[in-house]
Amino acid sequence: MQTIATLQRGEKGIIQDFDIDCVPLKLIEMGCLPGNQVELVQFAPFNDPLYININDSYVAIRKETAVQISIKKIV
C-alpha cells in the first residue's frame, strides 16, 4: 500500500482513502480528501514532519498521520 509517507521529494499522488479518526479535522478542511492531488515538497530534519502541497496549500503533517493516508502515485 502506498501512502503519503512513501512519496519521495517532488512526487505526486492522488488521495485514495484514509481513516477519518486518524486524520485531524483541520487537514480535511484544507482539502485532504479522496480524489485530491498531493505533492511531497520536502522533509524536515529527521524526516518528520513532511511538507506537502494539497490544493495549492502548503501543510506540514506528522509522519504518523501521513502513513494513514493511502494514495495512488502519479507517474
Image: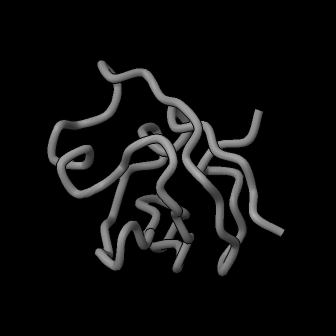
- List x then y, in percent, for residue 27: 25, 49
**In the rendered image, the vertical position of residue 45 relative to residue 37, given as above or below:** below
Image quadrant in which you'd find residue 24: top left
Q: Residue at x 56, y 70 (%)?
A: 40
Image quadrant in which you'd find residue 60: bottom left
- List x then y, in percent, for residue 36: 47, 55
Instruction: Point out the residue furthest to the front here.
Output: 35
5 left or right of 45?
Answer: right
Callout count: 0
Instruction: Point out the residue furthest to the right here.
Output: 75
**In the rendered image, the vertical position of residue 52 relative to residue 13, given as above or below:** below
Q: Residue at x 59, y 38 (%)?
A: 16
**In the rendered image, the vertical position of residue 51 relative to residue 48, given as above or below:** below
Q: Quadrant of the N terminus?
A: top right
56 left or right of 8?
Answer: left
- List x then y, in percent, for residue 20: 33, 23
Coloring scheme used: one colour
Could you say which is closer to the camera, residue 72 or residue 22? 72
Could you say which is closer to the camera, residue 71 or residue 48? 71
Q: Residue at x 25, y 44 (%)?
A: 28
Q: Quadrant of the C terminus?
A: bottom right
Could you say which is closer to the camera, residue 55 or residue 65? 55
Q: Residue at x 75, y 64 (%)?
A: 74
- List x then y, in percent, for residue 55: 36, 70
